[in-house]
């Protein structure tokens, strides 16, 4: 099964000049979704994983499925003021400005082995910030797992200290 057949390009979304990779056709097809989960699991292999950390919001789709298959915790990372309990935050640079992400302070225990998951690796700013959040709480980032990677944006250079795994590379 070619997963790329279930990912459509949307020109000029969310702003002019951006070619958005839309995974909603993949999500609407149970067989394609199951195949994507299996491919993501293959990337994790037989590593011991205590938690999958999913990045808001598209990282939640496959992140929860991976956690269920691995019988481990799912931990959401969200934009500010979206999580109800005490949080810690990480601010990171965007092309124009900055953004912040938060995680519950009790979500990760010292020494927890964590896989970070999102739908796409673009510039690496968001994923790098989440790695810092996990490490701030004492977790060990085993891997950063992505359905897609936009390799021409060279995020791997920004994240060279982490094990980056992608199912699809553009």
Image (cartoon, rainbow, N blue to C red):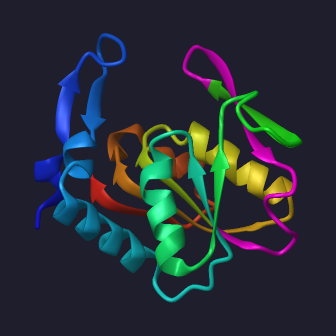
Q: Quadrant of residue 147?
A: bottom left
Tell me which residue sits at (34%, 43%) in the image: 150
Residue farthest toward the top in the current orientation of the protein: 16
- Residue 2: quarter of image: bottom left
Which region of the structure is painted magenta?
94-114
Residue 51: quarter of image: bottom right
Residue 126 in the image, given as x and y percentages of width and height:
59, 39
Where is residue 12 drawn, in percent x and y?
A: 26, 15
Viewed as shown, does residue 127 lie left or right of 165? right
Quick check: 75 above or below 120? below
Q: Could you say where residue 100 lies in the image, as x and y percent from the top left?
A: 71, 29
Residue 151, above or below 161: above
Q: Is residue 91 above or below residue 57?
A: above
Q: Position of residue 77 (x, y in %)?
A: 66, 45
Of residues 75 and 45, the one drawn nearer to the viewer in this rendering: 75
Q: What residue is shown at x 64% (from left), y 50% (from top)?
A: 76
Residue at 26%, 36% (x, y): give it. 22
Is residue 7 in sight in this rendering? yes
The answer to if 106 sits in the magenta stretch is yes
């Amino acid at each position: 099964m070619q997963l790329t057949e279930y990912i459509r390009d949307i020109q000029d979304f969310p702003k002019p000049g951006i070619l958005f990779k839309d995974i909603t056709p993949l999500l609407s097809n149970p067989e394609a979704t199951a195949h994507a989960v299996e491919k993501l699991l293959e990337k994790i292999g037989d590593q011991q994983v205590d938690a999958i950390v999913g990045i808001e919001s598209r990282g939640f789709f496959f992140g929860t499925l991976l956690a269920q298959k691995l019988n481990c915790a799912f931990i959401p990372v969200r934009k500010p003021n979206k999580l109800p309990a005490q949080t810690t935050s990480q601010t990171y640079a965007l092309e124009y400005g900055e953004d912040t992400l938060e995680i519950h302070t009790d979500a990760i225990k010292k020494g927890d082995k964590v896989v970070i998951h999102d739908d796409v690796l673009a510039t690496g700013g968001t994923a790098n910030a989440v790695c810092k959040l996990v490490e701030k709480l004492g977790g060990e980032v085993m891997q950063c797992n992505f359905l897609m990677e936009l390799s021409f944006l060279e995020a791997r250079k920004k994240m060279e200290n982490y094990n980056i795994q992608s199912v699809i590379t553009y």
